[in-house]
Structure formats: structure tokens, C-alpha cells
Amino acid sequence: MVFQRFRRATVDPADQQKLDQSLSKTRRGVLGRIGTIFQANEITEELWEELEEVLIMGDVGVDTTMKLVAATRDRVAQAGIKRTDEAYALLKEEMVRILQADAPPLDIDNPNRLLTVVLVVGVNGSGKTTSIGKLAHYYRKRGRRVVLAAADTFRAAAIDQLKVWGERAGVSVISHMPGADPGAVVYDAIRASQESRDADILIIDTAGRLHTNYNLMKEMEKIRNVAQRQVHKAPHEVLLVLDATTGQNAITQASKFGDSVGVTGVILTKLDSTAKGGVVLAIADQLGVPVRFVGTGEKIEDLAEFDPWVFVESLLEHE
Ligand SMILES: Nc1nc2c(ncn2[C@@H]2O[C@H](COP(=O)(O)OP(=O)(O)O)[C@@H](O)[C@H]2O)c(=O)[nH]1
Ligand SMILES: [Mg+2]
């Protein structure tokens, strides 16, 4: 049995390379030992225990590790597999499955829709604004017309920061004064996208923290509602930005947003500066939504489309 070296045709080779490079720290960390574990001569109880230990230390998390190892062991037993290389191939397949390889494509490329609305949420410092700048550049390069909405009105600096990214990416930014109602910003941004600016993707930046007596989730719901009233089925994607360097805390961050904002996908940032890349598996598994993009650095082009096969191959099959 050979691991399928299948890659989705849609993934840009440049993206594959960026994803691969951003995993170098993770590869050099504990997860890099998985290959060695499977170089053993036979499949023993110790092999599975060692695998569990390495996965947990590699930020895959206890629950996801248990699930992954149990699924692999079951398949090994059912198929009567005796060779470690064959068991290794099954582990990779199970990893790809956990990474939601069968998820439908990102709902941003629908040619029949006039305006696609993407809401970006996450805690402060996770990399929302930076990722939005990168996304604007990414889609613009692909011939799309992008507009950004500065709905993080909590801090003046946040609005300015988005404007800087808008300039870099060559797209317009719709903003109000600091402290303005984010719903009103979104309302204006949608109108501007539909009318004068003739855009086909609107990406909304949001706050990660508010005054203590104000509910962030309520605000997100309000933004959702404004979008929904103006554009059929908007927001079409709600992307949660998570910081990979926080490891398992990323899961806790995510649970704060919970179901209330209806997250449809994850942008995992700072994969380049952490050995905790194993958290990708925990995120996809625990949140039940696919990782769509990864941040691979601080520059505008440092964004890669996430692909489960490329991830697993890069993590485990590197020469
Ligand atoms: N190395 C690295 N740094 C990143 C990445 N994404 C964001 N950052 C940095 O993370 C910090 C916070 O980003 P920002 O976009 O302001 O986060 P926000 O508060 O969620 O909007 C900035 O210093 C960014 O340069 C990434 O993919 N890799
Ligand atoms: Mg920001």
C-alpha cells in the first residue's frame, strides 16, 4: 500500500513551497521524529505509545492524538498489516482525513455571485489585519476586485493599519472615525462595493477586544446581520484567524468565538515562527472547520493556501 501522492490541482506550486518552508521549524521539532518511529522493524505496543507521546508533545493535543492513533491502529489491525512502512502510510491518510481533505472549496470563487463578503474574526494580535492585507493582495493578483472594510473601530491605530495594508495591496479601504458603529462601516462598505467601486470581494476587518462591558460576540452578530440584509447569504465565509505560536491556546481562543459567529474556516498565522505546527491537526479536528490559509511570514506575499496533502507530505516525507 503506497501513500497517495495526490495533490489538489488547484493548489499553486508557489503556495506548496511556502507551506513547506513555513513548516521547517515544526519539522525540526518533535514531530520530525515520527519518521524515525516508523523505521522500527515491527509494529509493537511501544511504537504506538511513542507515536502518541510525540504527537502530544508536538501540539496535536490529547484528544486529536488519541483519535488519530486509534483510527490508524484500527485500520492496521483490520487490514492485517505487519510492515511499519504500510502502517506509516495509513497514519498519513488518517492525518489527511482529520485535516478535512473532503471539505468543499472555499466559497470565494463563485462566479455567479456579484459580491462575496468575507468576515474576518479573531483575538487581538492573532494577525487579522495582516492576513486581510495578504488576502487582498492574493485575490487581486488573481484578477479579483477587492475592497476592505475597517470595522475594527475600537482603536484608531487599527483603522490606520488597515489603510496601510490597503495601499500596499492597491485596494480601497472603507472606514469611519474611531469609535464609530462597525455595523455602519459594513453597511457603507457594501454599498461602496456594489456601486462606485464595482468590487467582487469585500473583506471585513473586525475588533478582537472591546470595552469590558461590551460584548464582542454581540457586535459580530450585528455585523453579520447588516451584511445578511444587504447581500444574499452574506457573509459567505467567516474566517477565524488563529496564532499558531500559541499552540493549544489557539483552540481556547477559537472556543471564545464558538458558534455565535458561524466560523466557516481558519487562517493559521505565524506558522513560520513556531515549532507548534502540529496544532493544525487539533484545530481542524476540534473546531470541525477546515484550515484554509496559513501565514508564512510578515510580508504581503507570505500567505499560502492550505492543502492537507501538502501539509502531511511536507511534515513527514521531507528528505
Ligand atoms: N511571522 C509572522 N508574523 C505574523 C504573521 N501574521 C501576522 N504576523 C504579525 O503578528 C502581529 C499582529 O498582527 P495584526 O495583523 O496586527 O493582528 P490583529 O490584531 O489580529 O489585527 C504583527 O506584528 C504581524 O506582523 C505571520 O504569518 N507570520
Ligand atoms: Mg487588527
Image: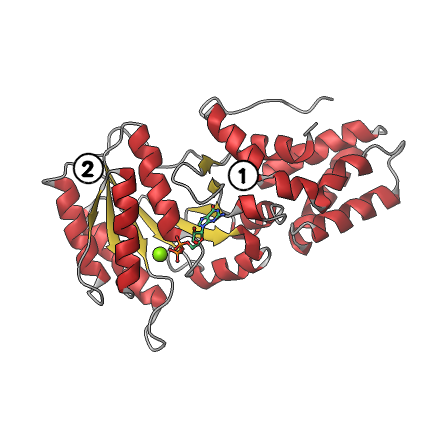
The quarter of the rendered structure image containing the N terminus is top right
Residue to which mark 1 is pinned: 100
Name the foreground residue: 138 vs 286. 138
Q: Secondary structure at mark 1?
A: loop
> Is residue 290 positioned above or below 314 on the image?
below
Q: Position of residue 166 (x, y in %)?
A: 26, 44
Q: Amino acid at mark 2?
A: Ala
Name the foreground residue: 159 vs 238. 159
Q: Secondary structure at mark 2?
A: loop
Name the foreground residue: 318 vs 256. 318
Q: Please give the label number shown on residue 72.
A: none
Residue at x-position 80% and y-position 36%: 36
Q: Position of residue 94 (x, y in %)?
A: 66, 37
Binning the other alpha carbons within 10 Å of mark 2 as few (below 14), some (14 to 19) or many (20 upward) gives many
Q: Residue furthest left?
A: 196
Residue to which mark 2 is pinned: 199
Q: Position of residue 13 (x, y in %)?
A: 49, 24
Residue at x-position 38% and y-position 62%: 208
The answer to whether any part of residue 152 appears in the image is: no
Is residue 268 left or right of 84 when viewed as pictured? left
Q: Earlier in the sequence, mark 2 or mark 1?
A: 1
Could you tell me how far apart the alpha carbons at marks 2 and 1 are, in whole angstroms?
31 Å
Name the foreground residue: 206 vs 220. 206
Is residue 18 left or right of 301 when viewed as pictured? right
Q: Position of residue 189 (x, y in %)?
A: 18, 49
Q: Amino acid at mark 1?
A: Gln
Q: How many marks?
A: 2
